[in-house]
Amino acid sequence: MAKSTSKPKGWLIGRQQVNDWEALATRQMADQDYSGAIRTVKRIMQYVPRKDKVFAEALGSLGTIYALQKNFEESYQAYTQALAIDGENAYLFYNRGISARLTFRTGQSLLDLEYAAEIEGDGKMTEKIQKALEVARELVLSEITLRGPGFTVELLIEQQEYFQEGLALMKAGKWQLAVEDFSHSIELADCLPQPWGNRGICHLMLGEFDQSEADFNRALEIDPEYDLARTNMKEMPYWRAHPDEKPRFVINQPLADVNTNLSLV
């Protein structure tokens, strides 16, 4: 029997061809052929309108593939793009909620999972969402308690997003802009060593050694065992003596072995 070639409005190919590619991508994911699955999903995205829900589903699949590869930031961003198209999809909110947790956006994770629960109601995802919500609430309570009275989930989301934007700018080598984001994160609540440590690296890359050393010292005041700051403080005399050299740095992925626990849309 011939395949249907009918095309929904705005599509460049028929529905059957998209179904075939979706099935292929699912098989590729099952076979752990993630590069192949990404190519297949992006192929779908070339032939359907960007505002179509099928485009959002493809972005959701990309988010899942990236998470399976432990590329959690890419996963989070793919789900965010999908939700901009299909903002009433419980699966997408659930999956972004998990990816948010895995990128240390615990505030956003809680918000997304609450939306997922509201949309899903008594559906088949309800139990899974509720279990994830329990974890999210515990994490957010711990984070807010650390920051003190009056700190809100909204402030937590803002602070954590500044931190993640700072990391992205570091990866892009935009050191001064990263300094500004880490500074905003610190201003909202000065309780963690990581923003200070990362800001110290940015100042180091800019050749601003006094500021860098001050940042590492502050990080160690908060956590004397913070290895990033301790290591860089030991190496500071070398960098001062060799200002034309630039240190190499790596942004570690601390959750490389985590179970992603995502659901396919």
Image: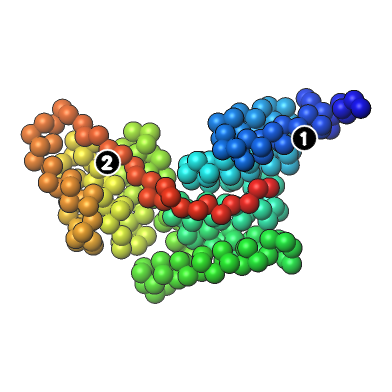
Q: Where, by quadrant of the figure, is residue 123 drawn?
A: bottom right
**Residue 138 x/y as whole percent:** 47, 70
Quarter of the N terminus within the rendering: top right
For residue 6, above or below residue 203: above
- For disc 2, the neighbor class at 10 Å (few under 14, some 14 to 19, many from 20) is many
Q: As drawn, which residue projects farthest toward the bottom?
A: 149
Task: Tell me if residue 176 can be seen.
Answer: no
Along the line of sight, which residue is nearer the eye, 41 or 54? 41
Along the line of sight, which residue is nearer the eye, 14 or 213? 14
Residue displayed at 82% across by 31% down: 16
Residue displayed at 70% across by 52% down: 89
For residue 50, above or below residue 95: above
Q: Which mark is residue 119?
A: none
Q: Which residue is mark 1?
A: 19
**Relative to 1, is 213 on the left or the right?**
left
Along the line of sight, which residue is nearer the eye, 178 or 5? 5
**Residue 28 x/y as whole percent:** 63, 35
**Relative to 162, is 38 on the left or the right?**
right
**Residue 255 x/y as whole percent:** 41, 51
Residue displayed at 57% across by 34% down: 33
In three-dimensional space, the C-alpha distance between marks 1 and 2, rounded to whole angstroms, equals 47 Å
Disc 1 marks a residue whose amino acid type is Asn
Q: Which mark is residue 202?
A: 2
Task: Tell me if residue 124 can be seen.
Answer: yes
Does label 1 or label 2 sit earlier along the sequence?
A: 1
For residue 24, above or below residue 118: above
For residue 137, above or below residue 112: below
Q: Secondary structure at mark 2?
A: helix
Q: Secondary structure at mark 1?
A: helix
Along the line of sight, which residue is nearer the eye, 218 or 93? 93
**Residue 60 x/y as whole percent:** 63, 43
Disc 2 marks a residue whose amino acid type is Cys
